Image: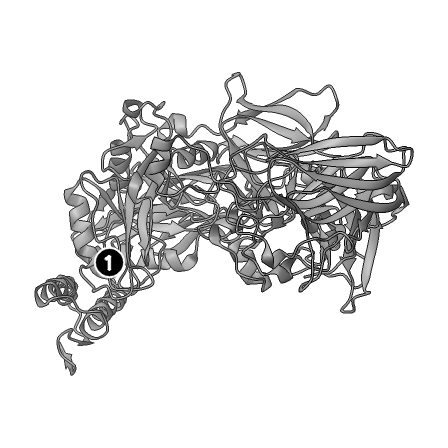
Amino acid sequence: MMKIPPSPHFTPVSLTEVFNANQEQLDETLQLNLSSEQWVGSRTLRGILFELGWPERPNVILLDQEPVHIALDPIQATFVLFLHTVADQQSALPEDLADSLGSLLPTGNELGETVSEYCLEYVDGSVATAAIQRRFAIQQAHIGWGASAFTAVPASEPKVMPSAAEAIITGQKAVHFGQGETRHISGRDSSMEHLWLYALPNPQPEKAIRRITCIPKNEKSVIYAISHTQLADHPLRPSVCQKLKLTLPEGAALNAIHELERIDIDLGLVISARAVLDYDRDHWLSADPVVQPEQLTTSVIVEYSAHPQAKLYVKTGTADTDIAVFDLADLAQEASIVQINPAIHPVRLRVVERGSNTPVPVRLHLHGAAGEYLPPKGYHRKVNPSWFEDNYGEFVNGRNQYCYIPGDCVVDLPHGDVFIEITRGYEVAPIRSQFVVTSETEEVTFELERVLYWREQGWVTADTHVHFLSPQTALLEGAAEGVNVVNLLASQWGEMFSNVGDFDGRSTFGAKEFGGDGEFLVRVGTENRMLVLGHISLLGYTGAMIHPLCSGGPSESALGDALEVTMADWARRCIAQNGLVVMPHAPNPQCERAADIVLGLVNAIEMMSFNPFDAQITPYGLADWYRYLNLGYHIPVVGGSDKMSAAMLLGGMRTYAHLGEREFTYENWMAAIRGGNTFVTVGPLAELTVEGLTPGQTLHLPATGGTVNVTWRVESASLPVERVEIVVGGQAVEQVEVAGQLAMSGSVELTVVESTWIALRVRGSYQEKRGEIAAHTSAVQVLVGDKPIFSPVEATAVLEQIEGAIAYVDTLAPRPDATRYKKLRLTLESAYNRLHLRLHQNGVYHQHSLPHHQENHEH
């Protein structure tokens, strides 16, 4: 803890000659539970110096029967500050109500009684008397919630707290999870024990005070210390949040989360001191899809609440004297400090679609001229990117922070330049601009322009994999990101369960039958998980929740849990309950997913990216999917975010599915996924036909093969396309360089002589990494004669995965009862035998390990 000197604007009064009682000998209504050592000697409280008494002698003023006179060398003061408390008082309740409590409690709710009088006697003999009333100028030490004093503050000042994740990263003392999200402790908490600070205003500050007389009235009270000041502004009133840009003095350094820890204010509180984000204005106003600021290491933006006469202290070394001091009362003389215009001007911000005055949900970012983030009312000043913390309608991408608004919000802005970014999915042109706020600015409206019209052509978007959000927040984020279907998945993490209470097996939030407009939907399903065997997403099923949510022990289910089921069991129940089965986040976990695909229980394979600005479609996931396509399993591809924190973008990786002639409902969306005309994307939109057939369909050629016509179309609202590839059987056989354009189409004639599949792959990168994959369609199967699509190499690899699942069940899995064990093992064996039979049917004889024997056999 950084130690700073008390404010020089206060002078303590010595009470040694007038102390008349000892803290430890006070009766129980005035006794403190904390050690008396806590309240002795020189103490700085809220930046103010007080001289308290010492132990084993009189060390407090007890106001009980007689007045106490405190002689002073004549002082000039605008305020006289008292550290005091009144005796605990039990709540006054009607007798019949009090009986129900058993005993009355000292809640501190009583108010208005005159406890004492404090009299200021001036050198001219005149006297000013102030009544000290319970719960106004004074309060008891032990209170219930909501019983703070009205004109006094606790001696315990507020404290800023790091989040739980930040405390771990920076090596600070661990915080309670809830406090890590509130980001502060108020100092008024009822669980604490309080002495109270009261600043008595001097009605005649021009006169010198020669004596203070304290007169007991209706209750006993105790004075611990007195100080005084000549400050004009009330010394205990906190200011609103202010900001300044501070160039770090030599020796000061930022911590692991790019914040300055060793900084403090004597008469106030530092809320945060974060590295300055330096935005290049021209780059911000460019058409680049992503603009990140430079994070400076030499300066910070300090948010603080402080008295106008406060001083700011920055630690610059290890010695006590290694401190740089800045006078906040005279910032014009501080070369290292630039005052930032306060964000106190409320502005209504509206975002509408061009041609309409109706607000539309969007993702929004605002920052000021100094790079400071400007959140609307109701949103965090610092978006928390950590797992399972502050699950809210917000997003953080690198150094840029965002919030989701329903198209209308109020935001406190500074006068001057304000910079804005507005996005709404992959068919609307984003806005990144700048505007000026003046004292006359009341409302600013922005118009979004739809530049692509795939929704009108029957395509709907979806995120197959979202966690932790409430359904309504998921609905807002989905609408703001242009995601028509959000699959919010309940699950389990050890002893923690998420979204279980949001599942009812029937409701589709946003649907017309549930009061929505039917354009943006949220459905709660489940992700059922096992650490080794794998994860499976069960979407849109009706009826009872499919339990257990997780199985087989940590970290998915709880310690001591048996392996009760296979993923195949979960999948069969989902299908029976009219749901959609998705294998999430390909390629991992690579274990039982192989068996479930072989058993025909999987409707789609998911490509996943937490944040496409960090990582796009993984080639490993595609390779895993290609493996099954090369075995003839005609499974479509879908996209999901696996969103679990604000650092993960809902719909960043998304599915496009074509409805055909169907009306848009959740059930019809599931049917479209099963139909297979889908593509997954982080930005570009892609369409493919093979001889007029779309992905999910099968083209039949004669036994001799033939030539097929492949047509394609790619469009993007903002992410430039680098290259388009026609993929046949996993290999790019045709490539078209697009060179950064936003739209292109084409066709090609391909000769096909073996059964295979054809899909479209699109390259483009937010990070300007050559070769990154930005979109991929599902596949059109092309069957030549009666030849199946079957790769012996891939079949052997899949067979080995199934063997691995059986080996785990046999050796290390926490074993259930004998009946369950036999059932789950037979499920895996049936998949093994089915694929093994296909190998033999295709004339492949190979060496392998049978799942129920240790020795090798050749067949």
The location of residue 646, given as percent across then percent down, is: 49, 46
668 left or right of 333 in image: left
Rendered image coloring scheme = one colour
Q: Helix, strand or loop at disc 1?
A: loop
Q: Is residue 681 visible?
A: yes
Residue appearing at x 49%, y 54% in the figure: 176
Identified by mark 1, the residue type is: Leu
Using a 10 Å C-alpha cutoff, classify the residue at mark 1 as few (fewer than 14 neighbours), some (14 to 19) or many (20 or more).
many
Residue appearing at x 22%, y 70% in the figure: 813
The location of residue 299, given as percent across then percent down, is: 76, 52
Residue at the spot of label 1: 631
Quadrant in the picture for residue 624: bottom left
- Above or below — where is 793 with respect to 783? below
Residue appearing at x 51%, y 35% in the figure: 109
Quadrant in the picture for residue 55: bottom right
The location of residue 603, given as percent across then percent down, is: 24, 47
Among all residues in the image, which is located at the extreme bottom? 855
Q: Which quarter of the figure is the N terminus placed in? A: bottom right
Among all residues in the image, which is located at the extreme left? 819
